[in-house]
Structure formats: C-alpha cells, structure tokens
Amino acid sequence: MSNEVGAGADAPGRPRRSWRLVLALVAAAAVIAGVLSFYASSSPDGLNRVAEDKQFSSLEQSHDAEDSPLAGYATSGVDDGRLSGGLAGVIGVGLTFLIGGGIFLVVRRRSTT
Amino acid sequence: MHVPDGFFDAAVSAGAAVVAAGGVAVCLRKAGHELDERTAPLAGAVAAFIFAVQMINFPVGLGTSGHLMGGALAAILVGPYAGALCVTVVLIVQGLVFADGGLTALGINVLLMAFATTVVGWLVFRLASSVLPKTRASVTLAAGLGAFVSVPAAALVFVGLFALGGNADLSIGSVAAAMTGFHVLIGIGEGLITAATIGFVATIRPDLVHGLRGVLAREQAALAEGTA
C-alpha cells in the first residue's frame, strides 16, 4: 500500500508518515480560500438573519480590527475583487497553518524520552 | 455564527472569555496525548482547511446562508481536544486579522463554535458509532450525524447565553425557534461536508483518522485472530 520508496520510505513496523495528507489538505485549503471563496453566498448567515428578523442587528458595533489590511477578507490596496479576496484567503490559510501547526508541534506527545 | 461586538453585555462576554481561556488551557494539556509527530502537523492543516471552508457560505434558502463550523470535523480527524484548539486558532486569526467575530465576543465565539461543536459533535459521533455496525462506512455516517447535530446545538448555546446577557429584551422562545430553524438547515450542509471529508481521508489514510482508531484496532485484532 505504501508508495513511499527510497531514502524517505517508512521503515517496516513504523507508522506511515503524514506529510502527503498535510500537503493535500493545505493545498485544498489554498484553492478553496484563494479561488472558490469568490463564489460564496453573500446572503446573511443564520445568526445575522435572526438578528435582522428579531431587530437586534443594530446592536452590532464597529470592529476593533476594522483597519486591519485584511479586514473583511479583502486585501487593502488590491482593487480587483477576485484577487483581493483570494489573496486574503491564501494569507489566512498560511497564517492558520503556521500558528496551528506551531502550537500543535509544541504540545504534542514525544515518542522518545 | 460569528458574534460581533455589541450583542452581549460585559458580564457575559467577560465570563465567557474566562471559561474559554480555562477550556483552552485544558485542551492544550490534553491535546498532547492525542497528537504525535505525525498528527501534530496534520492538526495544523485541519485548522487551515477549516479556515478556508469557513469562507464558503452556502445558501440554505429563505435568503440565508451558512458555513461550516468544523468542530465535529476536527474532533473526528485529530481528537476532540486538538479539534477544539483547531477551531479556536481559526477564530483568533479571523477576529484579529480579518475583523470577523468581535474581539470582546471572542470568548463567546470560542464557546459556541470551538467547544460546543466539538463536544456535541464528538459525543454524537461516538454514540452513533457504538450503535452502528463497526465498519468504515459507519464512521462516515456517524461523522455526518455528529456534525449535523453540532450546529443547532451551538445555536442553542447562543440562545442560552443571550438569555443570560443579550443586549436586547426579546422573547427567548422566539429567538430559540428562529436560531434552531436556520441552524438545522445549516447543519445539513455541515453534516454533508464533514461526512465527505472524513470519508475521503478514511479511504486514503484511515490510520490518521482519530475517530477510526477503535475500528482499526478491531480489524487488526480480528486479523490476528484469523491468522493465529
């Protein structure tokens, strides 16, 4: 079943590595956030819809991070909507992977020692 | 379901932040037992994947949309404690960098979308797995069910918190009915996306699916018994 051959191959009895699946998930995430997100529905989500129906949506205050260069999933300074949103999405995927992966590598169980 | 600033009073916002911080501390300790050097980077990739899929709002009819929350998906792939941390990382990045989800509401959002969904999604998944035949197909179905239930469950936690400290004087029954109605519809999408993703990973790398560990151990035991 394992098609990893050569120097990087998994030794028998050792668990198979995960980097292919990691790469596949991050690549899929980059395509989804970078390209497909452009086609997302712009209708209000469930909570916003209920807030409108029940007339409490006016409670919403401006966001403390509204001046962030990526606020609202748009890249400031990039005029093209498709590019602006796609770039913001890809940056978000990269940030989330690095921060999440970093935390999980620190807390993981060590197999030796 | 990202709660903006202004929906909740200071007491509930602060209380939720304290509870969320305590929960994250517990998860940080427990996640170490779920992750090893192979699954730690996988958990990072799962967080990135959830960030991306959360950008895809799908229409659920009635001029309303929803997106994946991902708590059930993450719990089944990498374990409930690591899974809750995956969604928490996504929420922090969204709040701080993308101005999505209020910063004073971050604790509330973590309780709703990171904790309620992973706890309920994982419990329903385990319950369904214990009832269904012990096969890999059952794992996909159980994953979909857990994800489906997790969304209206999170909506009800919102309603409970809103009853405690929402900044609007509303009939809680009517808010509960509306929140549950829309989030049952969104839950169908959550269930389908989760079942498809778990089914895919379970096909190519079942050994990396946390929720499949019981089934794989059974298969190995049966295999060992057969050859003995």
Image (tube, rainbow, N blue to C red):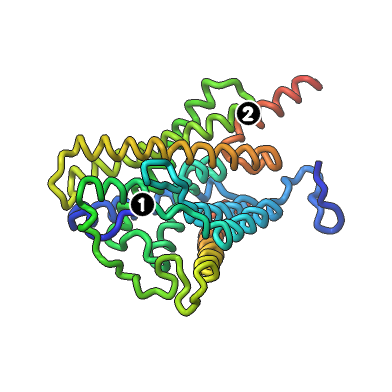
* Direction from residue B161 to residue B74 in the image, left or right: right
Residue B203 at x, y percent in the picture: 69, 38
Instruction: Indicate the secondary structure of the residue bearing disc 1.
Output: loop
Residue B71 at x, y percent in the picture: 46, 45
Label disc, if present, on residue B137 of the rendered structure: 2
Q: Residue at x 45, y 31 (%)?
A: B124
- The amino acid pointed to by label 2 is Ala
Q: Residue at x 59, y 39 (%)?
A: B196
Label disc, if present, on residue A44 of the rendered structure: 1
* Direction from residue A21 to residue A42 in the image, left or right: left
Frontmost residue, B225 versus A54: A54
Chain letter of mark 1 equals: A
Residue B64 at x, y percent in the picture: 37, 46
Instruction: Indicate the secondary structure of the residue bearing disc 2.
Output: helix
Residue B199 at x, y percent in the picture: 62, 37
Q: Residues within 10 Å of mark 2 (few under 14, many from 20)?
A: some
Residue B179 sits in which quadrant? top left
Q: Residue at x 76, y 25 (%)?
A: B224
Residue A33 sits in which quadrant? bottom right
